[in-house]
Amino acid sequence: MATKRTLLFVFAASTFALNAMYPAIAQVYPARPITMVVPFPAGGPSDAVGRILAEHMRASLGQPVIVENVAGAGGSIGVGRVARAVPDGYTIGLGIWSTHVVNAAIYKLPYDVMNDFEPIALLANNSSVIVTKKTVPTNDLKGLIAWLKANPGKASHGTAGVGSPPHIAGALFQQITDTRFQFVHYRGAAPAMQDLVAGHIDINIETPVTSLPQMRAGTIKAFAVTSKSRLASALDVPTVDEAGLPGFYFTVWFAFFAPKGTPKPIIDKVVAATRNALAAPEVRAQFADLGLDVFPLEQQTPAALGALQKADIEKWWPIIKAAGIKAE
């Protein structure tokens, strides 16, 4: 009995000591560079968001934020790297809708998307753009749908991986338009866009971050934006409502997560640095140029991110499973 009391006393004392240390840890945090894991290759939308914010978070944190691209398996390899990291604030992950919602419905993951992370803050969201290679023989969305129907199973649609936003968007597009095409899965959005520009694939439904530079360069065709309003940075591209596919809305959010158990005082410091970066006029201008909408200040919180993630899991898991989307 005495031994049991002793063990309980030691446990309680240790817990008290750790809790007492948290404020002290937060006071000196960060004392060295922070790693931001981006679970996709360089050049894609997540990489662009991460690098813009990393540059501006340095001023608030007083330490460099180093972007580490860890690609593969629809982002789950990089997200797993964050889940396994020491919860000391020196590793944070940039996650998106697909990595922290979709992947859990299609992959057998070695982590739990809801319970193995600490939400930090919502960053931005954006719609997608329906784009094709230059040589597709049509110039409007209705014509594209007609062409796909006339050539069932012959066209190819690029994705950033199984379960990535372009994959889910493409699957929904097929269901709504009663068309059929082949999916070609890449390790990220950037290589998929490279092959679209080169004419190796026919169509993609991709974020403005990846598609806008090519649209401006005239190397691809743009048919519609998957939102209710046109992009301020591409006003000549119609909405899906205007182009003849009403209601085909599709948006993707970006957010920061930390490993489970990261102390709240440290989370609070990262939240503050994130908010400062998102408030910077130059960051907002860069995001707007990429077709990204910054979340309102009241949504740049752990609670708002956790609530949105939970709501999206409840909404999308049944849809994904009904569509039969599985890891290959």
Image: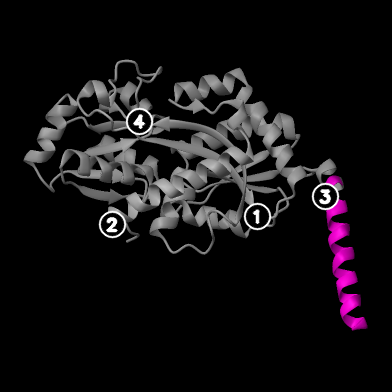
In this view of the protein, which residue sits in the foreground, 116 or 181?
Answer: 116
How far apart marks 1 and 4 lie (CA) works out to 34 Å
* Residue 200 visible in the shown view: no
Range covered by the magenta-colored residues: 1-23
Position in image of residue 223 (x %, y %): 24, 26
Residue drawn 38% across the image and 58% down it: 106
Q: Which residue is drawn at 16% across and 46% down?
A: 180
Which is nearer the N-term, disc 1 or disc 3? 3
The colour mode here is one colour
Q: In terms of secondary structure, where does tag 3 sit?
A: helix
Q: In which quarter of the image is residue 179?
A: top left
Please state which amino acid type lies under the numbered disc 3: Tyr
Judged left or right of residue 327, residue 63 is right
Mark 4: which amino acid? Answer: Ser
Q: Label 2's element?
A: loop
307 to 105, vertically: above or below: above
* Residue labelled with disc 1: 260
For label 4, the residue is: 211
Q: Which of marks 4 and 2 is in front?
A: 2
Q: Where is residue 159 in the image (x, y as percent from the top left)?
A: 32, 45
Give the label, 4 or 3, closer to the camera.
3
Residue topped by disc 2: 324
Query: Do the CB atoms of the residues marked 1 and 4 lie less than 8 Å apart?
Result: no
In the image, what residue type sits under mark 2?
Gly
- Asked whether, in this view, residue 320 is left or right of residue 280, the answer is left
Query: Seen in the image, is 287 located left or right of residue 139?
Result: right
Q: Quadrant of residue 120?
A: top right
Q: Name the residue under label 3.
A: 22
Q: Distance between the residues labelled 2 and 3?
A: 45 Å
- Among numbered discs 2 and 3, the one appearing first in the sequence: 3
